[in-house]
């Protein structure tokens, strides 16, 4: 691998702007970023998101302060994206790096911590002289893109001229906020002022699953996170996530994961 094929830098300065021509850019933005300006259009509320930008796009990041890092920027050459391991993913198949769109992924609870850990390992690897470094770098990149492609369950495109993708983006944002209260597709369709059928049609066309699957995945992912990374009792988690009873929570969890909440926690 060309030593210049991949670069990584922390988002630490008050202002960071595009400097590397010909590179695709991947932003992992944590808290503390005031705005991301893309082709002179500012986007706010970008925390806990990943953006994929084509080399032709100009950009500038503005931080609120420089006391701490607010994430990472990955600069990727075409050589990297043409790697056989990465070329099989949707990152190429659905043109995440298309020149006429601004793909953005909102990370689910728990996933953001994993992404941060992987990027920290990449940062360490890229500056090292370890044997098999290139293979490790490609493997870590593949893991990031698999998370974005599958676990996050959405490729939200910031585009005013695509009504269906805009609707799916709004739906996913609502699910992130309301999944512990609203479990029915009809609830979200009503909030979005569309029919159940149209909402399902848009979601199926955009991300390949129906609306119920998105809601269910969000509930399962949040359940897994709470079970693995908190000391709350199963009963507390059950009611906090909007399940009617511990028995139903156990049934629901086992149906979708193959194991009970107790088995996950004990494992």
Image (tube, helix red, strand yellow):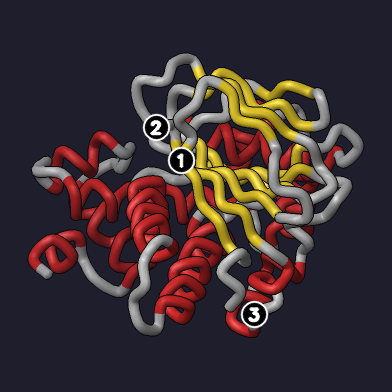
Q: From the image, tell me which residue sits under label 2.
A: 69
Residue 65 located left or right of residue 84: left
Q: Which mark is residue 105?
A: none
Q: Position of residue 266 (x, y in %)?
A: 8, 66
Report if residue 186 is visible in the image: yes
Residue appearing at x 40%, y 61% in the figure: 127
Q: From the image, tell me which residue sits under label 1.
A: 10
Q: Quadrant of the N terminus?
A: bottom right
Which residue is nearer to you in this view: 16 or 116?
16
The mark nearer the N terminus, 1 or 3, is: 1
Q: Do residues under tags 1 and 2 come within 8 Å of each other at their CB atoms?
A: yes
Q: From the image, tell me which residue sits under label 3.
A: 83
The mark nearer the N terminus, 3 or 2, is: 2
Q: Position of residue 163 (x, y in %)?
A: 85, 38
Q: Position of residue 83 (x, y in %)?
A: 64, 80
Which residue is nearer to you in this view: 90 or 193?
90
Report if residue 195 is visible in the image: no
The mark nearer the N terminus, 1 or 2, is: 1
């Amino acid at each position: 691998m060309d030593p210049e094929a991949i670069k990584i830098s922390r988002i630490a300065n008050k202002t960071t702007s595009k400097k590397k021509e010909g590179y695709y850019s991947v932003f992992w933005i944590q808290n503390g970023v005031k705005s991301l300006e893309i082709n002179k259009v500012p986007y706010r509320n970008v925390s806990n998101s990943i953006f994929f930008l084509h080399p032709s796009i100009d950009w500038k990041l503005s931080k609120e302060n420089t006391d701490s890092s607010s994430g990472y920027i990955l600069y990727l050459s075409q050589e990297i994206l043409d790697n056989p391991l990465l070329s099989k993913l949707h990152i190429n198949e659905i043109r995440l790096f298309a020149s006429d769109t601004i793909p953005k992924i909102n990370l689910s609870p728990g996933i953001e911590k994993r992404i941060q850990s992987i990027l920290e390992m990449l940062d360490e690897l890229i500056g090292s002289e370890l044997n098999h470094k290139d293979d490790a770098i490609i493997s870590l990149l593949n893991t990031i893109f698999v998370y974005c492609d599958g676990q996050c369950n959405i490729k939200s495109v910031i585009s005013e001229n695509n009504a269906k993708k805009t609707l799916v983006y709004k739906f996913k944002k609502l699910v992130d906020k309301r999944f512990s209260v609203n479990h029915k597709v009809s609830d979200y369709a009503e909030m979005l002022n569309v029919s159940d059928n149209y909402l399902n049609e848009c979601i199926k066309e955009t991300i390949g699953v129906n609306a119920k699957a998105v809601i269910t995945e969000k509930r399962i992912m949040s359940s897994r996170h709470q079970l693995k990374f908190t000391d709350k009792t199963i009963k507390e988690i059950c009611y906090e996530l909007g399940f009617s009873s511990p028995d139903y929570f156990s049934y629901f969890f086992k149906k979708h994961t193959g194991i009970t909440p107790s088995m996950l926690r004990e494992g």
